[in-house]
Amino acid sequence: MIALILAGGKGLRLRPLTDDRPKPLVPVAGKPIAEWQLDWLRSNGDLERVVFLCGWKWERLEEHFGSDYHGVGVEYSVEETPLGTGGAFRKAISEKGVSGEDVVMLNGDIITDLRIEEMGKVRGSVAPRPVVTLLLVPYRSRFGIVKVDERSFVTGFEEKPAFPDVWINGGVYLGDADRLLADLPQKGDIERETFPRLASRGQVTAYRYRGFWSLVDSVKDIQEVERELASRPQGLS
């Protein structure tokens, strides 16, 4: 298994934690986000190598991981100027010799206990095989909601409710790198350009997941993830 991890953003919402490091090196429960991701990927199968798609303070990533993480090869695809998510994936696939089906691609700020093999089973059950399969997770409001009756009386409150029938992009993809390459832009975003174009041709499928998943995009997110991880003595396995 090969994994491509987007790690090029400046993580502005996490400042000052990202003033001197890229977002994937921000610590959560005692270790960087990127280590949570690599340990999770290793627990999901035979991880051969990982490529960080990086820009901002990328040298810190190299200093931290070098070329090996517990027997997994670590490489770096460095952008001189921001290329967008689609351009970053295109550069890495082209320059790092990434090929074959079911390459794992993910955002560098996601922590989850998703079992990739289950995602792969669903992906493999579709014929013809899609170019890419997206992880979808239920939308959860970042705000509490107020319930009001027809007379405008407040009847209750619900803190950060989930909407189980509304799905959002979970930032983890299984894709055929060779087939993806034709639709990846030199510069631009995979979410705005590549996925809509592939979807219009019936080449994108979804894996809906209701388990643990979190975007780490603020200090409050870190606190919430740390509480969740503290309640899970088995970690993300």
Image: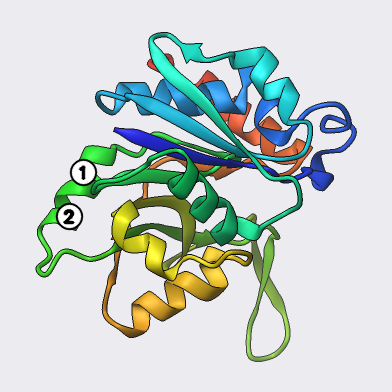
Circle 2 packing at 10 Å, graded few (<14), some (14-19), many (20+), is some
Classify residue 151 as left or right of residue 94. Answer: right
Q: Which residue: 64% across, 35% down?
A: 224
Label 2 amino acid?
A: Val
- Picture colour scheme: rainbow
Left or right: 158 with respect to 207?
Answer: right
Residue at the far bottom in the pictured view: 150
Q: Residue at x 64, y 66 (%)?
A: 156
Q: Is residue 163 left or right of residue 2?
A: right
Residue 41, above or below 29 = below
Residue at x 88% of width, y 32% of height: 19
Q: Is residue 218 visible?
A: yes
Q: Is residue 24 above or below residue 109?
A: above
Q: Circle 1 — which element?
A: helix
Tag 1 residue? 118
Residue at horizontal 45 percent and vertical 38 percent from the top: 96
Looking at the figure, which quarter contains the C terminus? top left
User: Where, quadrant-wise, is the N terminus in this rendering?
Assistant: top left
Where's residue 235, x and y in %? 42, 19
Nearest the camera: 231 or 1? 1
Residue 161 in view = no
- x%, y% of residue 182? 39, 67
Q: Is residue 60 left or right of residue 149?
A: right
Q: Amino acid at mark 1?
A: Glu
The CA span between labels 1 and 2 is: 7 Å
177 or 11: nearer the viewer: 177
Q: Position of residue 159 (x, y in %)?
A: 64, 55
Question: Tags 1 and 2 in contact by the CB under 8 Å rule?
Answer: yes
Q: Which residue is mark 2?
A: 122
Expressed as whole percent of the image width and height from the top left, the position of residue 47 reads 32, 25
Looking at the rendering, which quadrant does residue 146 occupy?
Answer: bottom right
